[in-house]
Image (cartoon, grey):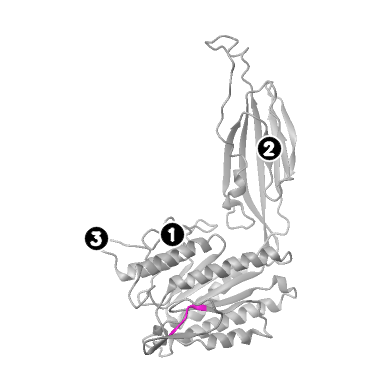
Amino acid sequence: MKKITQVVTFIMIVAMLFGLGRWQVNAADNITKSTVADSETINNWHAANAFDDSTKNVGRIWTDKSVSTGDVTLTGRQSESQSATITKGADSDFLVGLSALSSTAKIVGETTVPLDIVLVLDVSGSMFDPAGLTDRTKRIDRLKEAVNDFIDSSAKENDKRADENKQSRIAVIKFAGEESDKIGNETYRQGQYSYNYTQVVSGYKAYTSRDKSELQEKVNALKPAGATMADNAMNLAEKLVNQSKTDEASNADRKNVKRIVIFFTDGVPASVSNFDKDVAERAIKSAKSIKKDADIYTIGIFANADAKITGHTGDGEWTDIEKANAFMHGLSSNYPNAESYDNLGIRAKDSKGKETAYYKATDASSLKDIFTQIGDDIISSAQSPTDVGRILRTFKIKKNVEVTDNGKIII
C-alpha cells in the first residue's frame, strides 16, 4: 500500500485599517505616521521538517501569525513560480496573515523508493570471542550470517524492480583501527601485531540474486583485529551519505532516495580497549550530521547491552555500562540532536507518539533476527507519494467585513 500525504493550508490575510480619521490620537493632524512590524514568518513552513513528503508526521499542525507593513508574497515549497501576492491597500496600515497547516494521510496504493544502505561493521579483535556462554560460534561468524541474510533480502527486493534506478544499494564499512581512504580489506602492522584499517570495504552497488555473492564474499573475508574506533567509522559513513546525496542530485531518474546507516559493534568506542570519551564524542558529532539526511540504527552485543539505559542514574560517577548504552542511543536516530553520550537531548517520537527504537541491544546469537527486523522496517517504510498537492488559499477581509477569495496556488 502507498501512503500519500495531503497537506492543506488555509491562509487568511486580514487588512487592518487604522485610519487617522476614525482613531483619535493626542497629536496634531499633520504629524507624519510610520508603521513598524517584525519580520514575516508566513513562509517559514517551508523549513518545517514536520511536513515532508512522508507519513511519519501525520497529525501535526503548524500555525503562524505574521504582520506586514507592505505587500505579502506567499510562495510554494517546490517552485518559487507557485506564488501569490496579497496587496496592502493604500488605506491600510498593516496586513495580518493567519496560517494553519495540518497533515493527514490516505492509503491508496504502494510505491517503493530506492534505499541507500551503509553497513558499518565492527571487526575489532573481540569479534573472535564466542557468541555466548552456550554458543561457541565466533561473534564474527554470527555477524557474517546476519549480514549475508540481509544482503539476500535486499537482492530479492531488487529482483522485483526492473528499473535499476529504483533498486536499493548497499555499501559496507569495516572498522577497528586507523582510517584509510582506500576501498578494500587491508591491515597494517603496529609492532608485532596486525590491525584492521577502518575503511570502505565495498562502495554503493545495487545487488540482485544474480550478483549478490560478490558482496557476500567480501563480507566473508573479514577477519577481526584491532580496537573499536567508532569515530573513524562514522566519519566514513558520513562521506558515503554525502555521496548518496550527490548521486541522487546527478541522476534525474533516481529520486526520493531513503538513506539508512546500520552501525554494529560488540564493544565500547575505544582507541585501545576502555571507553574513550573523545572517540565517542567524535562519533556522535558525525552521527548528528548524518541524521539530517539518513536514519541511523545501532546494534550492540557487548556485555550488559541494554536499550532501556539512556544515561546516568543515582549518585557518583557514570559506570561503563551507562556510558556504553548512552553512546549507542546518542549515535542512533533515537536522539537526533545528541551532542555526546552525556548530552543526548530530546528523544524522538514516531508517528504514534511513542519513543523511537533505533538502538537494538541483543546478543550475537540473535543478530540474524535483529538484521531481519531492521530490514523489514526500512523496506516497508520506503514508500513515496506520487502526487502530493498543497493548496494555499488566501482571503482578504475588508473593513466592511466583506470576505473575498484571492485564489489558490498549489504549493
| Of labels 1 and 3, the one closer to you | 1
Residue 373, given in percent of the width and then of the height, sits at 54, 74
Span shown in magenta: 195-199
Q: Quadrant of the N terminus?
A: bottom right
Judge from the rendering whether residue 93 lies leftward or rightward of residue 119; answer left or right: right
Q: Residues within 10 Å of mark 3 (few under 14, many from 20)?
A: few
Mark number displayed over residue 338: 1
Residue 94, given in percent of the width and then of the height, sits at 62, 26
The residue to which callout 2 is attached is: 73
The residue to which callout 3 is attached is: 315
Above or below residue 141? Residue 35 is above
Q: Are marks 2 and 3 in contact (CB under 8 Å)?
A: no
Q: Amino acid at mark 1?
A: Ala
Can residue 129 be seen from the camera position used here? yes
Q: CA distance from mark 1 to mark 3?
A: 23 Å
Q: CA distance from mark 1 to mark 2?
A: 37 Å
Task: Please tell me which residue lies in front, 300 or 170.
Answer: 170
Q: Residue at coordinates 52% horizontally, 82% vertically from top-left?
A: 146
Q: Quadrant of residue 385?
A: bottom right
Mark 2 element type: strand
Q: Amino acid at mark 2?
A: Thr
Q: Main secondary structure of the magenta part?
A: strand
Name which of mark 1 and mark 3 comes first in the sequence: 3
Q: Residue at coordinates 61% horizontally, 19% vertically from top-left?
A: 18
Above or below residue 321? Residue 18 is above
Q: Quadrant of residue 225?
A: bottom left
Mark 1 element type: loop
Magenta stretch contains residue 374: no
Mark 3 element type: loop
Residue closest to the far left: 316
Q: Are marks 1 and 2 in contact (CB under 8 Å)?
A: no
Judge from the rendering whether residue 216 lies leftward or rightward of residue 179; answer left or right: right
